[in-house]
Image: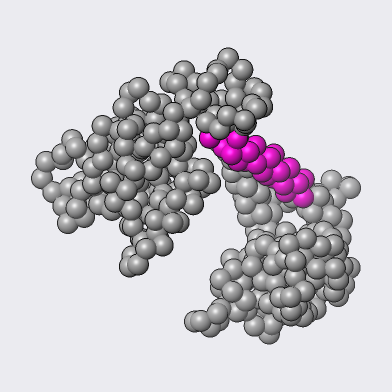
Amino acid sequence: MKEENKSVKNFPNLRFPEFKGEWELINLGNCAYSFEYGMNASAIKFDGKNRYIRITDIDESSSKYRPEFPVSPNGQLLDKYLVSENDILFARTGASTGKSYLYHKDDGKLYFAGFLIRAKIKEEFNSYFVFTQTKTIQYYKWVQLMSMRSGQPGINSQEYASYSFNIPSKNEQDKIVSFLTFIDSRISTQKKIIEKLETLMKGNLEKIFCQKLRFKNKQGNYFYDWRTTILNEICDIKKGEQLNKDDLTETGNYPCLNGGMGFSGYTDKFNSDENTITISEGGNSCGFVSFMKSKFWLGGHCYKIILKKDISSIFLFHLLKFYERKIMNLRVGSGLPNIQQKDLRNLQLLVSDNIEEQTKIANYLSSIQEKIETEKKVLEKLELQKKFLLANLFV
């Protein structure tokens, strides 16, 4: 693959060396035999035999169908609503406008419902190549522009057919698709690896903290039975300090954790040391437990755990991750939910007092967690690679 001289416009920045010449500007309508609307929802009834895909079943992150439940329409199933090879579905209204789905043979027999438009792609075009045009920055900008009109956002079949893009010969389409599907395959495999590791971690948390899996001491004997206590006996809980939004930037020496499951931004000051357990105090993700390995700023919607006694912080982190669902159930408030400090202090835990056992458990679980984090970094690099390719393999 080589970088092209862009003195001529209609070919991509990156190109396989055996292909020359400019790409042709065409409309989506030129690639399809027809554009058809899905079957009316009133024609559908549950019978447990057949499946249909709705506008909300398209998973934007994977561009795949998420099966919800089996249904079929009243009376005879009409073939015109059957999704088949080379079909692309488009969401035509509401917040999902612009989402697209390429039929996968592994999805089996599938019908498409209302608020979806089916484009039947002609055989002389590679349907995956055409579909990939709906994952580019240009397409997202076009959808945003089309959705800015008054009333409910929506794009009809004629408008979808008018979307234009550049396309090469069928051979070059196939070459690009072969390369991208290889990357997709690696991403899919990586996600499965992470999924299996996360299932392993979840299973081990259950076994260890319900004492179905026990560890032995240096003499080969099981450690003493655990005891029930409350969180307040083990640690202090401190709420963070609100940081002015003007003090937050996209880059900085220290991340700011202010509730939620991610950083709110970065700053050049910190109020909490590394190796600290945090619990989100407010918002939709309140109760989420995390472990900060570096110095950070603890925001006003987050708690940090300060150990009172000789206990492994990593052991306690894994223990609290096991109790995370229970912690989330402490939330109160119908508007902006939050977790009261007094309720968190009284959280009941089954805990080991033996530091040797705590260390064994911490090391074992951390080895799995580190493997998960390593595999997630690999996935992130693969997704960045695909993003780069999508930006440079197309005009």
Q: Residue 290 in the image: x percent, y percent?
A: 72, 62
Q: Which residues are magenta?
A: 366-395
Image-based side of 305 in relation to 154, left or right: right
Question: What residue lies at 65% left-to-right and 27% top-to-bottom?
Answer: 5
Q: Residue 105 in the image: x percent, y percent?
A: 37, 30
Q: Quadrant of residue 271?
A: bottom right
Is any atom of residue 329 visible in this view?
yes
Relative to 337, does residue 362 appear above or below in the rendering? Answer: above
Q: Quadrant of the N terminus?
A: top right
Relative to 216, does residue 306 appear above or below in the rendering? Answer: below
Image-based side of 73 in relation to 60, left or right: left
Nearer the observer, 4 or 18: 4
Q: Quadrant of residue 251?
A: bottom right
Nearer the observer, 363 or 24: 24
Question: What residue lies at 65% left-to-right and 63% top-to-bottom?
Answer: 261
Count of marks overlaid on the render:
0
Q: Residue 140 in the image: x percent, y percent?
A: 48, 50
Question: What residue lies at 77% left-to-right and 50% top-to-bottom?
Answer: 366
Magenta highlight on residue 380: yes
**Dominant secondary structure of the residues highlighted in magenta in the image:** helix
Magenta highlight on residue 94: no
Residue at the extreme top of the image, as rendered: 18
Residue at the extreme front of the image, as rendered: 7
Image-based side of 45 in relation to 188, left or right: left
Q: Quadrant of residue 371?
A: top right
Is any atom of residue 48 visible in this view?
no
Relative to 316, does residue 56 appear above or below in the rendering? Answer: above
Image-based side of 336 in relation to 151, left or right: right
Judging from the image, the colouring scheme is one colour
Question: What residue lies at 34% left-to-right and 31% top-to-bottom?
Answer: 31
Q: Residue 325 in the image: x percent, y percent?
A: 58, 66
